[in-house]
Image (tube, rainbow, N blue to C red):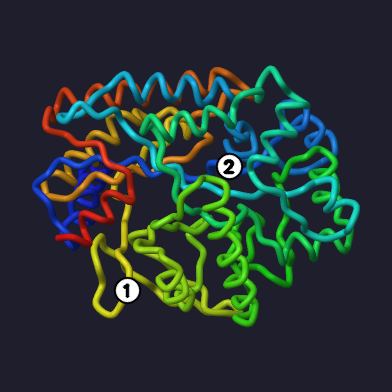
Amino acid sequence: MISKLKRALVDNLKNIPGWKTRRKIVVFSIDDYGNIRLDSRQARENLQQAGVPLNGRFDAYDTLGTRQDLSMLFDVLSSVKDTHGRSAVFTPYALPCNIHFEEALKQGRYVYETLPETYSKLAAEQPEAYEGAWDLWYEGIRAGFMKPQFHGREHLNIDLFNRKLSRKDEDIMANLQNRSYAGIQKDKEWPTVGFTHAFSFWKEEQVSGHKAILEDGLNRFEEVFGFPTTVFTPPAQQLHPKLYTYLEQSGVQAIDKPLLANRHTGEGNFKKEFNKTGRKKGQGHVTLVRNVVFEPNNGNADHVGKALSQIEAAFRWNKPANISSHRVNFCGHIDPRNREKGLGDLKELLNRITKKWPDAEFLSADELAKLIEKN
């Protein structure tokens, strides 16, 4: 009882500050689309046999979206309509590039390929899973089921990648040989740098390289998806605030940030940061803060009920419900049961939202940012 009361208190308190609206707006912010973590079930087994320490749900199920993943997701999103007759919509925070595994091994350094190139390779190697999958991306975007926004150029830290590859560390070599990138260990000299944290660093001087990656990544995003991004969230929410101005100058109108952050400023020093949805004085972008968590493959909790409770708290304080989730919840390439659970819970959540709040409206994250900017 105490834990439930505490959770309810937190759900309400976090919705007090920031931009308000009486509209019942629902946004699905989904991280990691476009990123390769595991190539296949066989690749995961090979990594385990090689002694790579795979842990948690991402190292168990997270793969590039297959044709069936996308088709079944679109079926769920299209099955529910909001007060305006619009289907539910995902905002996939997406990566336009991945590791070019063959060239990285050949050259001994990081080399990337674009997402369409990745899908083309996988369609040839695993046609039963990936043939036609990239075409489905475009169909989903045209139909309004997905509106991708920028999550970085790739979902990995290039400095750490090159450092480990130059030493031929066993974990990275096993991964590259299996066209995967999971279970990579930290470098003891860079304790703040995680292998999936594209913009994490140890010394502040490394941040200048992040600016170049952002510049190229924004261009690749537009090239791959056919339109420029207006919203950005970095992998694992790691980004030096000094890069905000550059992003604003590059056309990014909103940045998705955590409610509370402990920003690394260099060599183990941190600065606390509090964020709220809306425009903060002195910044040239809108801040978006997610206030609902929906991770149906993360344990055995009542994830639908938990999300509904958080949505109710958001609406109580006249806030949009910005639902945080990850692609891994809807992946079935390694284990179809994982996808069935995620999509089953998603459909239940959508049906209960529209039943409980008939005036609910589904928006993408960029549409929410434009609404905040307008008002």
Residue at (23%, 63%) from the top-left corner?
Answer: 278
Instruction: Report whether 170 appears left or right of 330.
Output: right
Q: Is residue 310 above or below residue 156?
A: above
The disc placed on residue 284 is 1
Residue 242, x across and y down, in percent? 47, 78
Residue 145, x across and y down, in percent? 38, 32
Say which label, 1 or 2, has the lower sequence index: 2
- Camera-side residue of 61 and 298: 61
Quadrant including the C terminus:
bottom left
Name the amino acid type tagged 1: Gly
Residue 117, x across and y down, in percent? 70, 41
Instruction: Report whether 170 appears left or right of 281.
Output: right
Residue at (51%, 64%) from the top-left corner?
Answer: 238
Q: Which residue is mark 2?
A: 34
Quadrant including the N terminus:
top left
- Camera-side residue of 127 and 274: 127
The number of callouts visible is 2
Q: Which quadrant of the structure image shows residue 47? A: top right
- Camera-side residue of 124 and 244: 124
SS under mark 1: loop
